[in-house]
Amino acid sequence: MRMTASKPKPAPPAAPSLLREQYIRLAEGLPSPASLSLGAVAERLCCGERNARLLLARMQAQTWLSWTPSRGRGRLSTLTLHQDPGALRVLQLQQLLEDGRVEAAFRGLPPAARSRVKQALPAFLGASPGGGLRMPFYRPLHALDPIHVTRRTEAHMVSQLCERLSAYDLTSESIVPALAHHWESREDGRCWRLWLRPGLRFQDGRPLRARDAAASLLRLRDTAGPHRALMSHLQDIACKGQRLDLQLLSPDHLLPHRLAHHACAILPEGDWARPDFTQLPIGAGAFRLLRNNEHRATLQAFEGYWGIRPLLDQIDLWVVPAGSAMPAVDIKLGQQSTQAHPGQQKRWQVLQQAEQGCDFVLLKPSRPAFATAAARCAIGHWLRSHVAGTTPGTRFRPARAWLPAWQHLLRPDPRPPAAPPLPRQLLMFTYELDEHIALARRVIEACEAAGSSVRLEVVSAPEFAAGVWHGPADLVVAGEVLGDDMEFGQYSALSGEAGFHAWLPPALRKSLATICRATAAEALPAQRLAAMESAFRRLALAGAFLPMRHVLQQLTHAPELGGVALARCGWMDFRKLWLPGA
C-alpha cells in the first residue's frame, strides 16, 4: 500500500466505506480471474450466501468486479476483479482522514502501513469540515491530572480544559477573576474570602459548588506531588453557599497567584477516582476533552463556559511525525524552519520570543569532584564555553542566569578555559526531549574529550518528574520555562517546583525556605521581585544549577489563521484562534 500527501478525492456517494472494506476483504490475495463457489465468497465476507450474493451485486454495480455464476452442479463461478484492492484501501484511508476518523484509519493496519499513514497525515491538517482546526503535535499527551502535570504542553492543556478561581491575564500582566468573581484578604494575608460566580457548571452538566473548590485545593495540599507546596500552608477551608473562607498558617499575599496555577484547577469533588480521569479530566474550562489517545486529542468548545466562548468549535491535535510538510493553514510549534506546499513558504508568519527560563546542568554535590561551589561553577564555566561554541543555528544563546534579562555569572573569557578535573566515569540523565538529548550529547563530547566516560540514560518525562534520577545520576541535563505569570513562576521555582531542589545542600535549602516565606508575606510586588532575583543569583553562584543556554521560542503559522499570539510557555490561547472561512 502506498499513501501520498496529496489532497484526497472524496469517494462517490454510491460507494459507502463499509462496501469498500468488504471488497478489500474479498479481493485481497485473490488472483483475477478466480474460480470459486458462492460459499467461498460468503466465507471471505464473513456472512451467509444470501448476503454474499447481494454484496456481489452491489460491488458489480460499482464496476469493481464481475461475477459470473456457474451453470451446472459442482462447477465453480468466475470472479474477475476490476479494482486494485490496494488502491481502494488508499481511497478508504484518505476518506477516513478527510472525515477526521483518525482512529478508524489506523485500526488493523500492520506497522509498515501505519508508518505510511502517519507520513500522510499533514495533508489533512488545517481547517476541518466541522468548523474546527486540526493542528500537529509530535507526541501524544501525557496524563492530565492537574496536580501532577509538570510539562508545559500538558500544563497548557489543563489550563484550556480546567478553570481556576483566579487567572493570569497576559495582556494586563495581572491576576484577574475567573471562577471567583471577587476576593479579599484579612489578618494581613492569613485569611482570604472568595465569592464564586453564580450558575457555574462543569462540562458534564454538574453544578460547580464551593465544596468542589474546597475538595480540589485540599487534595492538592494532601497529595504527594510536584506542586504540593502550593497549598502546604492551607490550614482550613470553610464553605458557606458560594463563598469560600481560606485560613492560612502564615501570611500570603501571593495567594491569588497560587490559585491561578494549573495545579489549583477546580474539579468535581471525588472525580479523580474515575478510572479514566487522568486521560479525560472534566473541568469548567473553555474546552472539553472529547478524546485523548495515541493518535490525537480533541478539544470541543464548552457552551456552558462562564467566560467568552472560544471562536472555534473544535481543535484537534494530531500526532504527526516531526519534520513533516505542513499544509497552507497550520501551526508549527518550537521549530526553526517551515516546510510548506510549493508557493506557501513565503506566506507563513513567524513569532519569536526568548523563553523565560534556561536549559541547565545539575551536578551531584556528593561526588567529591562536585562537592564545592567553586568546583561546580568552574565546570559550568567550562561546559558553557563548549555548548556556546558548538550550538548550531540561532535558536540558542549562552545563559549566565536563570532568566535572559539577568547576568549573574561572569561573561566568558575569550580564551577557552582549561578542562577541570572530572571523575573517570559518570552517569548522566535527561528526558525525552530532542533539544535536551542533543544538549546532553554535547556535554558528553566535552567530558569525554577531558578523559571522562559518560553513560547517558534517557527517560520519559513522567519518570524524570518522578525523580528516578535523584539517586543514581551524577549529572543531569534539564530545563525550566516559566509560564505567563513570571512573578509567581520565579516563586514556584524557588519554593520547590524546579528540578535543582533535589540536590540542594541542606543549608541552602533551609535558606531558600526562609526567603520564600518572607517573599509570600511581602505585600509589595517590587520587593518580592528583588528578593527572588537575589535568591536566584545566590543559587547560580553556588553552582546549584549551571545555566547553559536560553532558547528562542518560535511559532510559525499561515496568515489565514487568526488570533495567534505566543504565550510565555510557547503555546497560544486556543480560545482566540479563528479561521475566516469557518
Image (cartoon, rainbow, N blue to C red):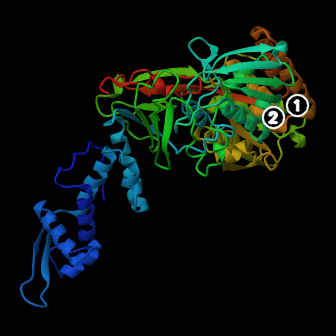
Q: Quadrant of residue 246?
A: top right
Q: Which residue is mark 1?
A: 509
**Position of residue 20 measured from the top left corner of the image (x, y, whole percent):** 24, 60
**Position of residue 391 measured from the top left corner of the image (x, y, whole percent):** 60, 32
Determine whether 346 is above or below 203 in the image. Answer: above
Q: Quadrant of residue 191?
A: top right
Which of the labelled discs sits on residue 92, or is there none? none
The residue at the point 7 percent across, 88 percent down is 72
Q: Residues within 10 Å of mark 2 (few under 14, many from 20)?
A: some
- Residue type at mark 2 is His
Q: Camera-side residue: 211 or 8?
A: 211
Q: Dividing the image into 4 quarters, which one contains the C terminus?
A: top left
Q: Is residue 97 visible?
A: yes
Q: Residues within 10 Å of mark 1 (few under 14, many from 20)?
A: some
Q: Which residue is mark 2?
A: 501
- Residue type at mark 1 is Arg
Q: Camera-side residue: 457 or 488?
A: 488
**Position of residue 265 measured from the top left corner of the image (x, y, whole percent):** 64, 32
Q: Camera-side residue: 199 or 203?
A: 199
Q: Camera-side residue: 139 or 223?
A: 223
Do the CB atoms of the residues marked 2 and 1 lie less than 8 Å apart? yes
Q: Earlier in the sequence, mark 2 or mark 1?
A: 2
Tell me how far mark 2 sits from mark 1, CA to CA. Answer: 7 Å
- Tell me the SS state at disc 1: helix
Q: Dividing the image into 4 quarters, which one contains the N terminus?
A: bottom left
The residue at the point 93 percent across, 30 percent down is 507
